[in-house]
């Protein structure tokens, strides 16, 4: 009998609530009773500093971790790219939902002349900043923080050429404007476009319920990307991109991974196809290859720069 009410913890932004409502509907359709409990995270409150200055790892998840450990909520829903690769003790990954669009896009104001001259691009992500400067070294980047709605408003209020967003976030809450271009050359954040649900390790009721929502292909691909990130010791701060996709026709995994210097001048990348049987260690081996070919030095430089 499904008598227990599963309390779903979420951030209180429009996108986070959309994600929580999506999980709630799926659980309700399976016959489970649910309740959504929204909390503000430090990452939403402290908007005056770049993310990497806040000790980024877990900044958007810590508040919900505490709510779970203290028994205020049973499960928590996150954008998977915001979740640290090492979960707190007692908390486990319970389900990865089928992935949405992985692409980053540039929202602009209808004039793209700046692409061939000087320009300013807004982003709160070191990964996006580094890749943009790698392709457009003549440009400047500025920090952009806040939830999706706040960032859209700041773009309109400032004299920037454009701002970079995850397509999935804009599509989920119907905020994708007409004035955008897909940045299909930009390698996304590990697990971008995927939603993850976490639960307490001993909560068998919630774990059993959530197992029915898990999408295996997305789980495997995001596992590879996050293993790549963890092996590079990126946390969420270094400019690291990773994307694994499954190719059904050949039963292969296509993996793209890259590490950039913060200024975008250095790029160490891997783009290869692997047999599906290699998935468990694929991210580790790809990252080791980058580390052994100059990546260690790039990571050391990044860590020194971020400490300043």
Image: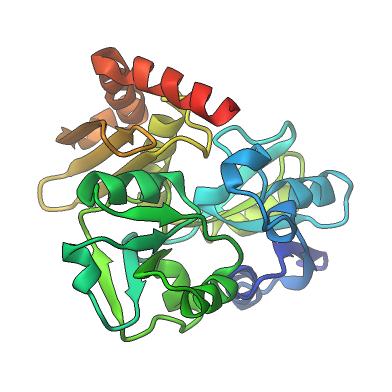
Q: Position of residue 187 (x, y in %)?
A: 29, 48
Rendered-image quadrant of the C terminus: top right
Residue 43 in the figure: left or right of residue 270: right
49 over 29 or under it: above or below:
above
| Location of residue 84 (image quadrant) | top right
Residue 206 in the figure: left or right of residue 280: right
Q: Position of residue 276 (x, y in %)?
A: 23, 37
**Colour setting:** rainbow
Image point (73%, 31%), residue name = 89
Q: Position of residue 68 (x, y in %)?
A: 80, 49
Image point (78%, 50%), residue name = 63
Image point (82%, 46%), residue name = 66
Image point (31%, 86%), residue name = 178
228 vs 141, nearest the viewer: 141
Q: How many marks?
A: 0
Residue 198 in the figure: left or right of residue 222: right
């Amino acid at each position: 009998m499904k008598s227990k009410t599963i309390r779903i913890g979420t951030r209180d932004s429009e996108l986070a609530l959309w994600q929580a409502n999506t999980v709630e509907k799926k659980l309700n359709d399976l016959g489970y009773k649910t309740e959504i409990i929204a909390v503000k995270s430090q990452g939403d409150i402290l908007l005056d500093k770049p993310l990497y200055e806040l000790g980024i790892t877990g900044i958007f998840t810590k508040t919900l971790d505490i709510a779970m450990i203290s028994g205020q909520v049973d499960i928590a829903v996150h954008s998977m790219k915001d979740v640290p690769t090492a979960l707190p003790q007692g908390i486990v990954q319970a389900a990865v939902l089928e992935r949405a669009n992985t692409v980053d896009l540039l929202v602009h104001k209808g004039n793209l002349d700046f692409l061939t001259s000087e320009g300013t691009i807004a982003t709160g992500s070191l990964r996006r900043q580094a890749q943009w400067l790698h392709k457009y070294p003549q440009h400047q980047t500025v920090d952009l923080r806040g939830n999706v709605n706040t960032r859209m408003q700041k773009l309109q209020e400032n004299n920037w050429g454009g701002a970079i967003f995850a397509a999935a976030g804009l599509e989920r809450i119907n905020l994708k404007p007409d004035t955008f271009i897909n940045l299909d050359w930009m390698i996304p954040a590990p697990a971008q476009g995927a939603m993850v649900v976490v639960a307490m390790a001993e909560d068998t009721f919630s774990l059993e319920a959530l197992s029915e929502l898990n999408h295996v292909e997305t789980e495997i691909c995001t596992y590879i990307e996050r293993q790549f990130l963890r092996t590079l010791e990126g946390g969420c701060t270094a400019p690291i991109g990773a994307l694994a996709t499954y190719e059904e026709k050949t039963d292969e995994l296509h993996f793209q991974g890259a590490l950039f210097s913060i200024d975008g001048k250095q790029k160490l990348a891997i783009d290869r196809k692997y047999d599906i049987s290699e998935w468990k260690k694929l991210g580790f081996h790809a990252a080791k290859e980058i580390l052994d070919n100059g990546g260690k030095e790039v990571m050391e430089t990044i860590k020194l720069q971020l400490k300043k």
